[in-house]
Amino acid sequence: MPVSDRYRPDPRFMKLGPEFADVVEPARFPVETLRFRNDRAAVTVGLDTLTPDEWLAAFARFEPLPDNQPAPLAIRYHGHQFRTYNPELGDGRGFLFAQMREDGTDRLLDLATKGSGQTPYSRFGDGRLTLKGGVREVLAASMLEALGVPTSRAFSLVETGEALERNDEPSPTRSAVLTRLSHSHIRFGVFQRHAFHEKPEHITALVDHSVETYFPDLADAADRPMALLKAVVERTARLVANWMAAGFVHGVLNTDNMVVTGESFDYGPWRFLPRNDPNFVAAYFDQTGLYSFGRQPEAAFWNLQQLASCLTLVSQTEPLIEALNGFAPTYRDALMAAMLKRLGLKPRGAEADLELVNTAFAALASGGEPLRWEPFFFDWFGGEASEARALAGPRAGIYDNEPFRAFRAQLATYEPDRPERLSDPYFARTEPEEMLIEEVEAVWTPIAERDDWSPFNEKLARIETVRRALGISVT
């Protein structure tokens, strides 16, 4: 397999041993039709040189990559699902396939799957993924990356030729296997499993692995569990702040859907906000609004508390509480930074930035139903430099109320960050690129009805124009 010289395998997770994962066999599929290949991501791990046949061998049949894991590993974990503990979880339709170093950053990256077949944790499931679910994940990850949100990246989507029965889709429906690229699959639930079984030695091993792999600057910490928790609290706070600025609702913020590196992944019933609404939910089954847009910081903090509880088996409680107490100030600062990033402005200082953010949210709320979330940031990107553009656009009437006059006065005190971005053709449009649920359905319908993938590919091409225009790095 002709990998490039940028390919640097580093299969570390398997060294933790059999208590952390099970060796599994990938499913054998009747059809292997490549529907999406992320060549830009593949360049970063040296896999862009794979031929079409070699790509399918790796990401449809999951033949081992050179010098990497000899076999897929289904990771063992537990978790709280809507705050009810479930000890019967684990990778039920996916596995860790390979690990390698990222070109340019040297960070470890995982290739892991969704829809790759049954494992010991499939319970009554078939271990498969619907093609529509795969399409939705590609779209979500692509849009979040364009908006600067820490996220896994959809790496490959292969249609697999099986007819699946699902309660939430017209059935039978088409099948697929997805491969995602992310910095970690160490979920909070991995710690929970070993705490549940009262195995402090395994928690210590997991802490050491996480520190040495993802936070090597903490290797000399006197209290590694506390240091790790502090780092995870900071990463998680930044992640949620970026969700909030992007108007993104994950939908299922269970403890098994959060990882120590603080990036979002595993996109199920996600949504982007149509307009400012703290009570907006993504999942039809979230009847109490537990994971609504406005409650996402609370949900993330609750999950961090469960992680801290696991770490009490190997650390003192007081330092862990101190680490948890860092969430609120870190989230506040991260939200200010994320909002400034979305508005394309240079920061002025904590007090001024907080006032701007508060004024921005008040303005968003004042716009009511006619003001959609994404157009607000599109119209005012660059601050005062975009005022003429915003007041000549389709939402000019909305921007003349008192809250917006206060917002515009605040913008006048800020400098645009990299103002040359406003010369990009993207900002000559009257409407921004969005990812509302109606657009997802509009992409899926031609695929379902006549196997027409052109709207899907065109949507991805337009999202790429957003990524290039905004030029926001994801860290």
Image (cartoon, rainbow, N blue to C red):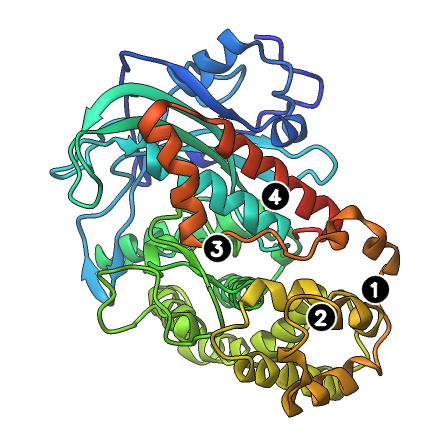
Q: Mark 2 points at which residue?
A: 340
Tell me residue 159's x, y (percent): 36, 22
- Mark 1 or 2 closer to N-term? 2
Res. 404 in view? yes
Residue 35 or residue 221, whichever sits in front: 35
Marks 1/2: CA–CA distance: 9 Å
Q: What residue type is labelled 4?
A: Ile
Q: Name the residue under label 3.
A: 260
Q: Which of marks 4 and 3 is in front?
A: 4
Answer whether labels 3 and 2 touch (C-beta < 8 Å).
no
Marks 4/2: CA–CA distance: 21 Å
Q: Is residue 382 left or right of residue 85?
A: right
Residue 26 or residue 438, whichever sits in front: 438
Marks 4/1: CA–CA distance: 21 Å
Helix, strand or loop under label 4:
helix
Marks 1/3: CA–CA distance: 31 Å
Residue 419 or residue 376, whichever sits in front: 376
Helix, strand or loop under label 2:
helix
How crowded is the residue under tag 3: few (<14 C-alpha within 10 Å), some, or many (20+)?
many
- Which residue is drawn at the image coordinates 75% and 83% (left, top)? 408
Q: Which amino acid does label 1 sit on?
A: Asp
- Mark 4 or 3 closer to N-term? 3
Quarter of the image where the N terminus is located: top right
Q: Mark 1 points at which residue?
A: 417
Tell me residue 473's x, y (percent): 71, 51
Q: Mark 4 points at which residue?
A: 463
- Which residue is drawn at the image coordinates 18% and 31% (left, top)? 126
Residue 446 or residue 151, whichever sits in front: 446
Marks 4/3: CA–CA distance: 28 Å
